[in-house]
Image: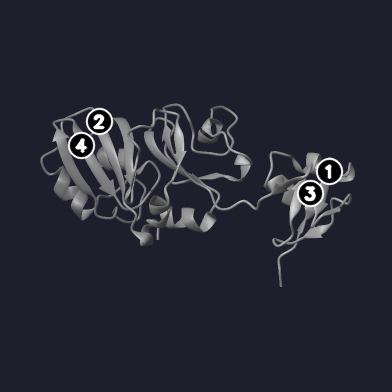
């Protein structure tokens, strides 16, 4: 049986109109369903119905996928009372339907994935799907000689009941490294280095799975994912 939805809700999902605006548009005769003017905003419609607003056909929204280069000072949330959010940087219709797939801390920069596809974002964040996250880390102190071995075996984080999953540490200089992890615990990268007596000064996410932050994206910019990038999340 086709899934039904109220006319005003269907119109608001594929336009910039709020539900209240969509109701007014219907009552004023601006909306047609299959060529017939429908003035009752509570009328039920299905996906197969052809909706037009002011004579222009409205297309059903497909899933949307974006990568964004997150700057410092932005939170990975839809709304926040104190700080700007990464969605404030997005200029897309119905962006209230979008959400972040794999959050970053307010003081962390780099790759953020944004979508309205809940199943896809679950695959991004679930450790069982093995989409590793790669971070570029700047540290306060020199990297301990045994740090790579400890991370490969998993480390105990303060307050946790089990070790972290094995992680790969590549030293780039005495105080700079690239870290690859396969899970996303709270402040995980910072806490992993803290467990070794070091402190993260700067943290930048470069990659999620095979999706690499586009070098041409300046901080605060975003672009749609390519079909190959979207399909890489399985």
At 69% from the left edge and 61% from the top edge, which residue is drawn?
47
The colour scheme of the drawn protein is one colour
Q: CA distance from mark 4 to mark 3?
A: 52 Å
Element on which disc 1 rests: loop
Query: Badge 1 is on which residue?
Result: 30
C-alpha span from label 3 to label 1: 12 Å
Q: Earlier in the sequence, mark 2 or mark 4?
A: 2
Label 4, secondary structure: give it. Answer: strand
- Comparing marks 2 and 1, which lies closer to the viewer? 1
Residue 19 visible to an observer of this rendering: yes
Instruction: Name the residue beneath numbered marker 2.
Output: 138
First reached walking from the N terminus: tag 3 or tag 1? 3
Q: Earlier in the sequence, mark 2 or mark 1?
A: 1
Q: Nearer the viewer, mark 4 or mark 3?
A: 3
User: Residue at image x 75%, y 63%?
Assistant: 4
Dot 3: few (<14), some (14–19), or many (≥20) neighbours within 10 Å? many
Q: Quadrant of residue 24?
A: top right
Instruction: For label 2, count other residues whose C-alpha is less than 10 Å away and answer few (under 14), some (14-19) or many (20+).
Output: many
Kindly report which numbered mark, 2 or 3, lies closer to the viewer in this rendering: 3
**Distance from label 2 to label 3 (Cα)?**
50 Å
Give left or right: position of 117 versus 94: left
What residue does disc 4 label? 177
Q: Residue at x 88, y 51 (%)?
A: 40
């Amino acid at each position: 049986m086709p899934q039904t939805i109220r006319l005003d809700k269907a119109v608001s999902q594929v336009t910039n109109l709020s539900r209240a605006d969509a109701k007014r548009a219907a009552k004023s005769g601006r909306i047609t369903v299959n060529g017939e003017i429908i003035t009752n905003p509570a009328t039920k419609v299905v996906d197969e119905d052809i909706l037009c607003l002011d004579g222009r056909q409205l297309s059903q929204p497909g899933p949307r996928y974006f990568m964004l280069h997150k700057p410092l000072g932005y939170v990975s949330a839809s709304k926040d009372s104190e700080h700007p959010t990464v969605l404030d940087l997005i200029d897309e219709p119905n962006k209230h339907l979008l959400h972040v797939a794999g959050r970053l801390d307010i003081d962390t920069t780099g790759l953020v994935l944004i979508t309205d596809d809940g199943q896809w974002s679950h695959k991004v964040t679930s450790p069982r799907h093995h989409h590793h996250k790669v971070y570029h880390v700047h540290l306060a102190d020199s990297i301990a000689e045994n740090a790579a071995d400890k991370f490969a075996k998993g480390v105990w984080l303060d307050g946790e009941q089990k070790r972290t999953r094995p992680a790969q540490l590549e030293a780039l200089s005495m105080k700079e490294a690239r870290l690859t992890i396969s899970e996303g615990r709270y402040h995980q990268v910072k806490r992993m280095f803290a467990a070794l007596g070091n402190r993260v000064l700067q943290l930048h996410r470069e990659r999620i799975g095979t999706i690499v932050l586009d070098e041409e994206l300046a901080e605060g910019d975003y672009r749609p994912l390519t079909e190959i990038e979207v399909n890489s999340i399985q």
